[in-house]
Each structure stands twice: as structure tokens, then as C-alpha cells.
């Protein structure tokens, strides 16, 4: 999706000023924030500025804090580690896939933030049975972050903060598009797990983000979004780059060394990639766009 289509759209409202944290700031997209909030499963939500929120998605916990919603967050998962140390003061309700429903209910939440990839459908159903409103997200394209900012900002009474985030994302997206014009197409094997080896299909946020710098992921499986992959010399030869994401599997230097020893054709192709930067949608996406531009520029060989 192009920058113009995903961010600018048909109308660019005239900038206006607001005062935030004692500073006068320019907003250029605040009028685009929707009055009606519809989530990834088509549920229309009413504004809830006094909500009690449990976030079951680490990247969205970070986004909620960045929207100024820290006081409204009453629960999180044990994998929600940003922003530290503020997030540590929020009670944990288990993991994204195994929620302690007793601990969850004890927090008396009104809303729970979920994601189609992160949280099983059964968890959403159990939460709904408790009388809590599930807000389901599913960003796939990089520009889906814009709708995410609007949804959570509008739903929880943080439209000005969301508008500021939209402006920051827009600027970062534009800068990356400029950088990408000088980058050649490259075929990338992006690894997220070992034993078995796993990668990302093209219908994932990671793959779509990499595509913004003309990197095409390989090892795709049309039936699985995070498929296992059989690595051999042929696949290694097909890759221009082999990236080891630092999450969810905690790859270390020894893993890269062992990989090259097993597949000598990978020499010079293997590199670490910051897994949080490349897989965490939400407010992290702003920094991720800058990170990816730098990474792609660094890993692009000089022109002959």
C-alpha cells in the first residue's frame, strides 16, 4: 500500500493547534478520527473514556500507554514488558493464549484488547461470557496502524494523542518511502523459530513491513501464516538475506554460527533483525520504520 493511499487519503485537513503537556503542537489529521469505532471482527464500539482495560497483546499494551491510557489499564499479560517500569505496576493475568480468568475477572475490567494472531477465539468467548467487551485487532498491512490508532484513541477518549501518533507515523512512513526508492529488490528468508524452523508468510505484518523496503519474504505457505520451512542449500541459495528475528525465539550468535557451519552458502547472508521492531504493530511502528530503513540501507551492497 502506498503512502498516499494509506495515510493521506482523499482529504488532508488543514492543520490546527492544540496544547498538550504544556506544549503547542500541530495536528494535521485529527479530523479524520472516526466517531464510530469498528474492530477487526466488525464489532461497532461505543466510546468508553472511563473504561477499565485489560490488554492481552504486548505491543498494544505499549500503544495504550503511549496514548496516555496508563491509568485505565488494570491488567496485562506476563509478556507485556513495555514500557518499563510502568507496565510492571499493572497486574498480570497470565499469557496471551492462557488467561487466568479468575484473576482477569477480579480486576473488574470493562474492555479487553485482543488480536486474532495472539489470542485464541476461545479466550475471546470466555471474556465475553464474563460481560467484558472484547476489542479485536488484526493489523496485517503496515498502514493498518493508522486504523489501530484511531480505533483505540477514539474508543478510549484519546483522539488528540492518536492524532499526534498518526502524524509521527505519517512522517516516518514518508521518510522510509524516500529511502526505499534507492533500494534494490531482495529475497529474504526471515526466521522466527528453530526446531522446527519457522518463517512468515506474505500475509503477515512482518512480511508486509519488509516489503516497504523492497524485501520479498520466501518460504511462503498459502495455508499457514507462520509455516515451518525445510532449509536446504537450495533455499539458502535462493535467499539474498537470511534474517534471524530476535523474537519470539531468542536467537544468539551461536545460532548464526551453527547455521553457517551447516549451510556454507549462507556465509555473508545471515544477520540479526530486531524482532520487536519488525513484528510489534502499534506505537512501536513509528520507530520500526526508521529502524528498517537503516537496516535495509546497511545490508544493501554498494552499487558496482
Image (cartoon, rainbow, N blue to C red):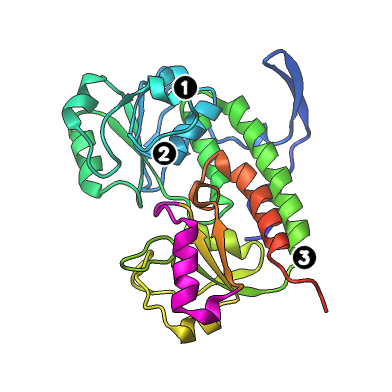
| Percent position of residue 268, x then y | 61, 73
Quarter the N terminus occupies: bottom right
Residue 265 falls inside the magenta stretch: yes
Residue closer to the observer: 176 or 35: 176
Quarter the C terminus occupies: bottom right
Instruction: Name the N-terminal-most of marks 2 and 3.
Output: 2
For the residues labelled 2 and 3, the Cα–Cα distance comes to: 32 Å
* Mark 2–mark 3 CB contact (< 8 Å): no
* Mark 3–mark 1 CB contact (< 8 Å): no
Kindly identify which numbered label has been placed on residue 194. none
Q: What residue appears at the point 42 percent right and 50 percent down from the top-left corner?
A: 138
Instruction: Look at the magenta stretch and give its main secondary structure.
Output: helix
Can you see residue 125? yes
Kindly identify which numbered label has been placed on residue 58. 2
Q: Which residue is mark 3?
A: 181
Residue 226 falls inside the magenta stretch: no
For the residues labelled 1 and 2, the Cα–Cα distance comes to: 13 Å
Neighbor class of circle 1 (other Cα within 10 Å; few <14, some 14-19, many 20+) is few
| Percent position of residue 289, x then y | 65, 50
Q: Please report the bounds of the magenta region as a residue range.
A: 247-267
Instruction: Name the N-terminal-most of marks 1 and 2.
Output: 2
Amino acid at each position: 500500500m502506498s503512502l498516499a493511499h494509506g495515510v493521506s487519503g482523499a482529504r488532508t485537513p488543514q492543520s490546527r493547534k492544540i496544547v498538550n503537556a504544556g506544549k503547542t503542537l500541530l495536528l494535521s489529521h485529527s479530523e479524520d478520527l472516526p466517531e464510530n469505532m469498528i474492530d477487526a471482527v466488525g464489532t461497532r464500539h461505543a466510546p468508553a473514556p472511563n473504561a477499565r482495560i485489560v490488554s492481552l497483546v504486548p505491543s498494544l499494551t505499549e500503544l495504550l500507554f503511549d496514548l496516555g491510557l496508563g491509568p485505565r489499564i488494570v491488567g496485562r499479560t506476563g509478556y507485556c514488558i513495555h514500557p518499563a517500569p510502568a507496565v510492571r505496576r499493572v497486574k498480570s493475568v497470565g499469557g496471551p493464549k492462557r488467561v487466568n480468568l479468575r484473576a482477569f475477572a477480579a480486576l473488574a475490567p470493562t474492555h479487553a484488547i485482543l488480536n486474532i494472531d495472539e489470542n485464541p477465539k476461545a479466550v475471546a468467548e470466555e471474556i465475553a461470557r464474563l460481560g467484558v467487551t472484547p476489542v479485536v485487532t488484526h493489523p496485517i498491512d503496515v498502514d493498518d496502524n493508522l486504523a489501530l490508532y484511531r480505533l483505540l484513541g477514539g474508543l478510549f477518549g484519546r483522539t488528540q494523542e492518536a492524532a499526534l501518533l498518526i502524524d509521527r507515523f505519517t512522517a516516518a512512513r514518508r521518510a522510509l518511502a524516500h529511502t526505499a526508492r534507492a533500494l534494490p529488490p531482495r529475497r529474504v528468508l526471515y526466521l522466527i523459530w528453530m526446531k522446527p524452523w519457522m518463517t512468515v508468510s506474505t500475509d503477515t505484518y512482518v512480511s508486509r513491513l519488509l516489503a516497504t523496503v523492497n524485501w520479498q519474504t520466501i518460504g511462503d505457505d498459502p495455508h499457514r501464516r507462520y509455516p515451518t520451512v525445510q532449509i536446504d542449500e537450495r533455499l539458502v541459495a535462493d535467499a539474498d538475506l537470511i534474517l534471524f528475528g530476535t523474537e519470539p525465539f531468542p536467537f544468539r550468535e551461536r545460532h548464526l554460527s551453527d547455521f553457517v557451519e551447516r549451510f556454507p552458502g549462507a556465509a555473508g547472508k545471515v544477520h540479526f533483525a530486531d524482532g520487536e521492531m519488525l513484528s510489534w504493530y502499534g506505537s512501536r511502528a513509528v520507530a520500526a520504520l526508521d529502524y528498517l530503513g537503516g537496516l535495509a540501507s546497511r545490508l544493501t551492497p554498494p552499487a558496482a
